[in-house]
Each structure stands twice: as structure tokens, then as C-alpha cells.
Image (spheres, helix red, strand yellow):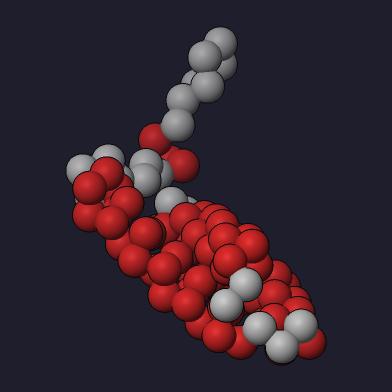
Amino acid sequence: MNTEYLLLFTIIFSALFFVIQRTEAKRRLFVTVLLAIMPGIFLRNWVIYRDMEREGWTALIIALVLNFLFWALIGRYNPVGSSDKIQVLGLDD
């Protein structure tokens, strides 16, 4: 198993899952579809082209575990805020 690619795939998958996890609830479906289509398919094709399916699946599982741990330890207690509650300083609305 090529550990350099395993680390690279784990970082990429973790970043994609983290963005989906920390997205506002109203936009989560849109972001999930967007990230599954664009980088997800590109990454899948690259893994198959380089003949590194084992590293890809292992990195996917590691990324899921890491993102679950982040959610369990940090994300559950600090939920994503709503964009409706954002107030810009200096506006008189």
C-alpha cells in the first residue's frame, strides 16, 4: 500500500466531508450534490486510473471515521449557525 497516496486521499476526502458537515442545513443538499459530482467523480476516476482502489477505499473509511470523531467531539456542541441570524455591523436595518 502506497502511504503517500493514502495520506493524500485521506486529506482530500476529509476536507470534502468537513465542508459538507459544516454547511448550513438549508444548503447541505446542494453542497453535497456539488461536491459529489465535481471533485468526487474526478477523484474516483483518478484513483481508478492510477490503480489505487485499495488506498482510495481505505482513505475513504479513515476520512469518515475522522469526520465522525470531529462531529462527536466538537461539531455536536458547536452547531452550524443560520445565515438568517448574521448581522452586519454598520447597517441600520
Estimate the x, y position of residue 55 in percent, counting from the top left. 57, 78
* Residue at (22% x, 54% y) in the render: 72
Of 89 and 53, the residue lying toward us: 53
Estimate the x, y position of residue 77 in percent, counting from the top left. 21, 43
In this picture, residue 14 sits left or right of residue 75: right
* Residue at (78% x, 87% y) in the render: 49
In this picture, residue 88 sits left or right of residue 78: right
Estimate the x, y position of residue 70 in percent, counting from the top left. 32, 51
Number of on-image labels: 0
Quarter of the image holding residue 32?
Answer: bottom right
Quadrant (top left, top right, bottom left, bottom right) of the N terminus: bottom right
Quarter of the image holding residue 90?
Answer: top right
* Residue at (45% x, 31% y) in the render: 86
The correct choice, above or below, for 15 with respect to 50 in the image is above
The correct choice, above or below, for 73 with respect to 21 in the image is above
Of 54 and 40, the residue lying toward us: 54
The correct choice, above or below, for 26 with respect to 62 in the image is above
* Residue at (70% x, 70% y) in the render: 39
Residue 92 appears in the rendering: no
Of 37 and 3, the residue lying toward us: 3
Estimate the x, y position of residue 20 in percent, counting from the top left. 49, 61
Quarter of the image holding residue 62?
Answer: bottom left
Of 7 and 68, the residue lying toward us: 7
Residue 65 appears in the rendering: yes
Q: Report the residue that reaches farthest toward the top.
A: 90
